[in-house]
Amino acid sequence: MNFMKSSYQTLLGRRVVKTALAVFLTALICEWIGWPPVFAVITAIVTIEPTVSDSIKKGLVRFPASAIGSAYAVLFIYLFNNSPLTYTLAAFFTIITCYRFKLHAGLLVATITAVAMVEVIHANLFMSFFTRLGTTTVGLLVSTLVNMFIFPPNYTKRIMANIQDLLTEMGEGLEAIIKQQLTHQEITPKQLEDFELLKKKLDQTNRLVNFQTDEAKYHRHTPQMERVFHYERENLDRLKWLHYHLGNLIRTPLNNLSWSEQQRTDILQMVEILVNVMKYPDRYKAEDYEQQLHHIMQQFWDSKQPNNAEYASLFTPEVIISYELASIYNIVEDILISEQEHTHERKAKSSLLKT
């Protein structure tokens, strides 16, 4: 599915609009003050980040880095005028100093500032240095304020959609894995690729959650929004565990399965019921679900009694599969209960607003 692609396209589109607005406002302010806008605009462009937190953190790095670049430009213009050696030394010492002080996020802006200043400074080096600090400050402040108040980052809808899509995809993967195990078929390279893709989608969603957590520091949130954030973090953690158990099933040896044909049919039916509620959470019924979990647990305890007395280990494929299914059942149940509570609260709030 392409849910992450569409999410990042939306994020990119908003970022382009915010960057354009930041550039316009920065140039407008600099023109009004009488400062050359080019350096402020460069700073504004690179300071628009996915979150306000990132903009502030990197801005605090880019300001001193730009000051270093400006200082070296002024120094070497004074010593060597406008010459190739001035460009070289300004860039070289700016890079070395930024690395020494670990100002990596500001390295590019500082170096560009240093070499660009060589071309535009011809007199009054001292004032040029402080003008450059002023334009950098304008670019940082404008881009940060635009990021904070214009299209403020809100990842909730994308995170919620991602969680449901991941649950659905994991259900489909689980069903395919169990069917193959019960018929002694090997896991295909395509399934392994899909399994790795699920991990990437989990990481991408986790990144959105981290963005949202950072962003929350700069905006007021209601108790309801805090509960939504808690719901997202908990269910994402559960999906990570679900992915872990799917991996265990993929790695389960397929030889020596002693289940009868009826037992295999029963397990497959239980998995189909599980996958159905993973795809359609509104079909979850606690009583029916608990009954299915009870069957899985019974299968687990039955599997711990090996038919062959000489079998040295209790960790037979039957035991592993039963245990992993029971674990998945428990995790999915926690997700579904959380989903029901969240849906009920959302509907209750909607009804309250209508009255």
Image (tube, helix red, strand yellow):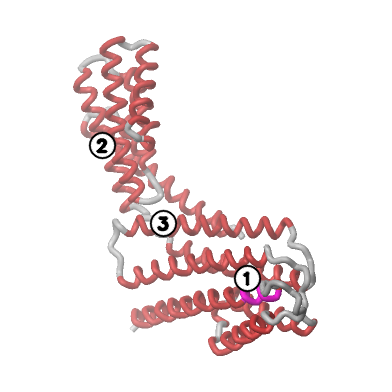
Q: Quadrant of residue 309?
A: bottom right
For label 2, the SS is helix
Q: Main secondary structure of the magenta part?
A: helix
Taking the spot 68% from the left edge, 84% from the top edge, the residue there is 302
Front in this rendered view, residue 44 or 338: 338
Q: Amino acid at mark 2?
A: Thr
Q: Amino acid at mark 3?
A: Asn
Front in this rendered view, residue 354 or 130: 130
Front in this rendered view, residue 255 or 264: 255
Residue 245 drawn at (x, y percent)? 60, 67
Q: Quadrant of the N terminus?
A: bottom right
Q: What's the mark number on residue 340?
A: none
Residue to which mark 2 is pinned? 137
Residue to which mark 3 is pinned? 210
Side of 301 where 142 appears, left or right: left
Residue 41 drawn at (x, y percent)? 34, 34
Q: Are marks 1 and 3 in contact (CB under 8 Å)?
A: no
What is the CA distance from the residue labelled 2 to the residue labelled 1?
A: 51 Å
